[in-house]
Image (cartoon, rainbow, N blue to C red):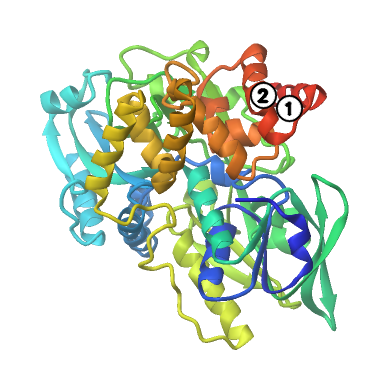
Amino acid sequence: MKRDFAALQGEFDLLVCGGGIYGAWTAYDAALRGLRVALVEQGDWAGATSSCSSKLIHGGLRYLETYDFKLVRKALKERRRLLRIAPHRVWPLRFGVPVYADSRNGTLLLKAGLTLYDALAGFPGEPMQHHHFWQQGFSQHFPFLNESGLHGGFTYGDAQTDDARLVLELVAGAQAHGAVCVNYAQLHVWNEQDGQVCGATVQDVVGGGTSQVSARQCVSTAGQWTTLTAQGRAWCRLSKGIHLVLPALPTSEAILLTAKKDGRVFFIIPWYGRTLLGTTDTDYRGDIDKVVVDEADVEYLLEAANGYLKQAWTSADVIGSYAGLRVMKQSDAAHPSAASRDWELKTAPNGLHHAIGGKLTSAREDAAVIVDTVCRRLGVAAPCATEERDLPWKPQQDFSAWSAQVSARAQALGIDGESAQWLQRRHGVRIAELFRLVEQAPQSSARIVPELPFIHAELSLCACDEMVVHLSDLLRRRLPLLILAKLDTAALQRLAVAVAPLLGWDERRIAQEVAACRS
């Protein structure tokens, strides 16, 4: 993956503005259909909401309470598809749901809901179907939960991903099929001819200068930045969600819980050897460029979790945190939790298409609708190519056999077993390039941070071939170290110095990058 701002000078069939999950799927789909595609992003790939999710590929069990069966069925269909076409990128994750004496939903109601969830998923069987446990069996699964008043509970299947890596792989796939994909390329203005959008003026945030990008069709997948216009504000409702990163709990399964304070659903999720606690869901009317984790958000989540834990977490246990904005269709729902998570395509009078709302899980199907619309406008008869196509970094052989071979190779190179498993999920077939780096520099098989499954060779691979511009790109989205570890200035300095020769940084630039990460 190489960044080439000059390549935007050409004429395109489709210009996509916004490099999150919706922009990435749209560009990838359109490129596979043979369209000449340009994808631009004002910051880094997945730099906003698409790297601030709960990292789940799921149907949304809680949406059954609002009778949104259509959305749940759609998401479960996509979950099944992604597990098939991207087993390296999306993997099964079981959830537990405890039933206490004071639970809002009792055993019978949960049983009915989970049976319906399995039915909407097409009765997937193991490892997705639900199971019931009485108190002792459930406590064995989740020994850290309070047992007072616990009647038992259920476990059921969903799936997990690394959201930023998913976006990156799709961008790489689009680029491999001829799309021009440029991060740090900021939209200055949409250009019009005879009242119809015909491209955009795009500014190079890295090198300065601008480019006039000509395109027959244009799509905005700008997420929260859609609300910069009065038209966008009329279409969108913004909700802030935060997550806290906490120490690992003794389980490989996640938990779905209900906050006793207000009845909201939240998750406790294992991820990269840590625990994600989230999320909040509050209307947001602040600065869309500066979405921060407030102290009240932290207190809310810790209080909600501590209502169930034997050993309480405190703010001192918080390793990292992140905040993002959900974009939802405008609604009159009293609380954002009650607003629809479904998606729609809006087309303005000037012909500019806008993606509004949606979910990480169902973005592929929604992007197919976008590209279908674009193709009709262009008079192109090309069906969607992403439905059954494996993601670009999926191994072509049997996945289990490939995984076993890769694990053996990693062990021979001195890479520990946990890191090897996560390397497969992060890089897919590109792990072969990583192994070559380790062969050349055996010391690069060591972990960057002892308690996290990332190795030094990844720094080189990502810096060289994943369109990294800033240190934060590398340490937040290519490897999520900034949220999973407390890196002090000295640690950031060491990492910046290690990749500086690969990125052409001098001492002044290193200092700037370290300072930016610290802030």
- From the top left corner, tell me how far across and down residue 382 is, in percent: 49, 82
Label 2 residue SS: helix
| Residue bearing mark 2 | 496
Give the residue type at disc 1. Glu
Question: SS at mark 1?
Answer: helix
* Residue 210 quadrant: bottom right
Circle 1 crowding by C-alpha within 10 Å: few under 14, some 14–19, many from 20: some
Above or below 237: residue 316: above
Q: Is residue 82 above or below residue 157?
A: below
The residue mark sitting in front, 2 or 1, is 2
User: Real-space Cα distance between discs 2 and 1?
Assistant: 8 Å
Marked residue nearer the N-terminal end (2 or 1): 2
Residue at 56% from the left image edge and 69% from the top image edge: 31
Q: Position of residue 370 (x, y in %)?
A: 56, 71
Q: Identify which amino acid the numbered label 2 is placed on.
A: Ala
Q: Nearer the viewer, residue 133 or 440?
A: 440
Residue carrying label 1: 513
For this orientation, the residue located farthest to the front is 440
Q: Is residue 41 above or below residue 299?
A: below
